[in-house]
Image (cartoon, rainbow, N blue to C red):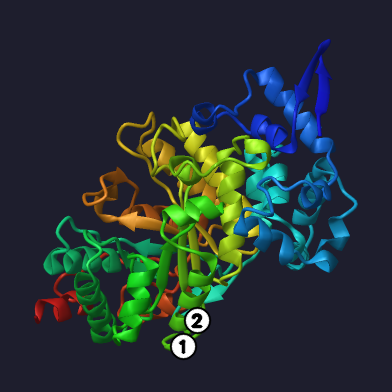
Amino acid sequence: MTYRQQISGHTYQFDSLVDVLAKATPQRSGDELAGCAAASDAERAAAAWVLADLPMATFLEEPVVPYETDDVTRLIIDTHDRPAFGPVSHLTVGGFRDWLLDTASRDDSAQTIAAVAPGLTPEMVAAVSKIMRNQDLIAVAAAATVRSAFRTSIGVPGALATRLQPNHPTDDARGIAAATLDGLLMGCGDAVIGINPATDSPQATSDLLQLLDEIRQRFEIPMQSCVLTHVTTTMDLIERGAPVDLVFQSIAGTQGANRSFGITLPMLQEANEAGRSLGRGTVGDNIMYLETGQGSALSAGAHLGTGGRPVDQQTLETRAYAVARALDPLLVNTVVGFIGPEYLYDGKQIVRAGLEDHFCGKLLGLPMGVDVCYTNHAEADQDDMDTLLTLLGVAGAAFVITVPGADDVMLGYQSLAFHDALYVRKALGLRPAPEFEAWLARLGMADGDGRVLPVDPARSPLLALAAGG
């Protein structure tokens, strides 16, 4: 279908829904690389105008990626909950934006948004995000509540959890243990202690799992651990009896992009069932940890949609959340600036993308976190990350990722430091996950308001135990 919009005497034409979505997207380098971005601000405004007037039901009638050739599209369409869609089915995309902002202002906002979430497709959510300002994305996300649990509870209102990421270039056990201790002393690790291994060796992965599980048991920490290896490696280790808490996998929004990761949707379901069969959780049984990132489909050359047209990276990113939603995960996070400036050029684009991803994931019912990060060759710096972290704290993000000194020496990118979590919790009155906070208080590491206390090396139980060997 062709769409037209006139602005200042000029008629802009868009030859498909895919074209409208792409050209309505706020400027980003990845869409320019793919050749689908608006050529001017005026064309972008015209596309946004067209998008705002489209009925929400359009996205059920015009697949962005063909149903016949893409299993993610089939998952989206086949699992769509029409009764849940009912309350907003009569709206346009612009009307849905108004509905969301009105709902966010009411006392029953969390329940109302949760009730409609199963009726929303990723394309609907991506579409409405494109015509929202940053403050709109923050206000609606803050009004939504999504919870999950394993040994700690994620997504609790008023809490901001953290992934403690103690990566090491050679997977050295002492280096990883030192970074882990550093993070724990600053109140990090309540979402997960997760290691990106330097290799995908099953034996090395098993050794790292054993190390983290020994730390957990020795210090009686209510936490979950994860080594971020390929899902097939984790399933093999489950069969061998390794202490697997969470099952990790990177996912994307098209069948081709997931194929590039070496995964299929049935494989992910099998891994989910295998992880749950272990019964290692204490307060819940959500065991999947999933990572996404704008630009992954383009990187894999798997970004083409209906009619062979390139689909914008943010819409494809949001489609990945349909894959995540089907797995009922504990944690989902976008590594928002990790792929590089070819996809998100500067701090402004990274901040906007982080807010979009968080909003879209949360609106679709996911316990959504963000790796607030950038590569060293991007036009961004730590001030931009401070801004995004603060905005995500206001928006009610489930968790963020923290690394020693904000510099991941193994992956070679910049993220958040452990003390950044202390800053945002104090500034916004946020707390750790409740089970983890209770542990911190029991060891004298946090006060009654959940604030981490300065460490006294002579009196810290954690340091004393660590020094004991």
Occupied quadrant, residue 261: bottom left
Occupied quadrant, residue 262: bottom left
Q: Is residue 175 left or right of residue 288?
A: left
Which amino acid, mark 2? Glu
Secondary structure category for the residue under label 2:
helix
Residue 315 in percent (x, y) is at 62, 44
Name the residue located 30 percent from the left edge and 35 percent from the top edge: 376
Residue 320 in percent (x, y) is at 56, 55
Q: Is residue 407 left or right of residue 230?
A: left
- Whether pointer 2 and pointer 1 mark residues with C-beta atoms closer than 8 Å, the reply is yes
Judged from this view, the residue extending furthest toward the front is 68
Q: Residues within 10 Å of mark 1 (few under 14, many from 20)?
A: few
Name the residue located 32 percent from the left edge and 65 percent from the top edge: 229
Q: Is residue 165 left or right of residue 211?
A: right
**Which disc number belongs to residue 189?**
none
Image vertical order of residue 5 relative to residue 270, above or below = above
Image vertical order of residue 226 relative to residue 313, above or below = below
36 or 145, which lies in front? 36
Residue 436 in percent (x, y) is at 41, 76
Residue designated by label 2 = 273
Q: Residues within 10 Å of mark 2 (few under 14, many from 20)?
A: some
Residue 294: in sight, yes or no? no
Residue 217 in percent (x, y) is at 27, 86
The quadrant of the picture occupied by the N terminus is top right
Residue designated by label 1 = 277
66 or 12, which lies in front? 66
Residue 188: in sight, yes or no? yes
257 or 51, which lies in front? 257
